[in-house]
Image (spheres, rainbow, N blue to C red):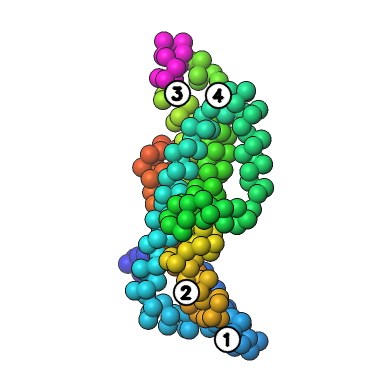
Amino acid sequence: MAEPKPQHAVSRMLNAAWVRPFLFLVFIVIAWDLSIRLFRIPAYQIPAPLDVVAVLRTEWPELLRQSWPTTYATVCGFLLSALFGIPVAMLIAGSKTVESYVYPLLVFSQSVPKIAIAPLFVVWFGFGIIPKVISAFLLGFFPVVVSAVQGFKSVDPDMVDLARAMQGNRFQVFCAVNLPHALPAIFSGLKVSVTLAVVGAVVGEFVGSNSGIGYVMQRSIGTFDLPTMFAALVILALLGVVLFWIVDRIEKLVIPWHVSQREDVIFAA
């Protein structure tokens, strides 16, 4: 009777949320290394995983130092996206007039490549942190607005009428009905926004910067130092995963009542 317990523990460990992505990552690295060996891909095209690991080990202090400007620009751009995106979404969802004027312009702005207008930010604001923050903000703003608009528009009108029938004023109805109903959609947009903000910060560093992970990648491309460039890509991927995880943790704290946060209960049932 004591024999199934270790098997159950192993099965539960393999089904943990972090184990499966880790195993899949190990599979990708092994396939990467085998592909280089089987097809004899030269190092100046794709570096071997061990070369990238060696760069991460030896250059870790420098990569960590260069990651701080990128992280700062990403977080600032993301916070600005949330700060401005949610109120704009409230205006769009609450007024047909505002939607008819503003929404088409937002969609039009997304068709403009950010890499094309990023040099303008350098001309206007110099080579400091501001152009990177603006680039991160522009890429993260649209997903927040679209998701929040969808969330506010999907509120059940009967719930709003019920809250008003209970003598609730406009602000009370919004806090009790509209905002809680829209929060799952808002957090979905925030998750997309925080990953795009990383891309925006790197785009700003590509255009004009002397620090940051984007600067490291640009310098590595110029010298054909592919292991360092791949190491910088690993740092960017880790940054995106960590920021996404933070937003996901905040979502679980803010809306623990939502069905998307009750997977354990569903599986147990």
Marking on residue 174: 3
What amino acid type is highlighted by mark number 4? Gly
Q: Quadrant of the N terminus?
A: bottom left
User: Horizontal and vertical percent for residue 74?
Assistant: 44, 54
Amino acid type at circle 3 is: Phe
Q: CA distance from mark 1 to mark 4?
A: 56 Å
| Residue 188 image point, x, y percent | 51, 44
Of residues 245 and 84, which is closer to you in this image?
84
Label 2: few (<14), some or many (≥20) within 10 Å? many
In this rendering, the label closer to the viewer, 3 or 1: 1
Asked if residue 164 is among those painted magenta in the image, a careful observer would answer yes
| Residue 239: percent from left, percent from top | 43, 61
Determine whether the residue tagged by mark 3 lies in a helix, strand or loop.
Answer: helix
Which span is picked out in magenta? 163-173
What secondary structure is found at the residue carrying circle 4? helix
**On the image, numbered disc 4 is attached to which residue?**
94
Q: Is residue 9 left or right of residue 267?
A: left
User: Which of disc 1 and disc 3 is earlier in sequence?
Assistant: 1
Q: Are marks 4 and 2 in contact (CB under 8 Å)?
A: no
Sequence-first disc among 2 and 1: 1
Name the kind of residue labelled 2 in the image: Ala
Label 2, label 3: how far apart the Cα atoms are: 47 Å
Along the polypeptide, which appears first: circle 4 or circle 2?
Answer: 4
Query: Does label 2 or label 3 sit earlier along the sequence?
Result: 3
| Residue that appears at 39% across and 56% down | 72
- Front residue (pair 60, 212): 212
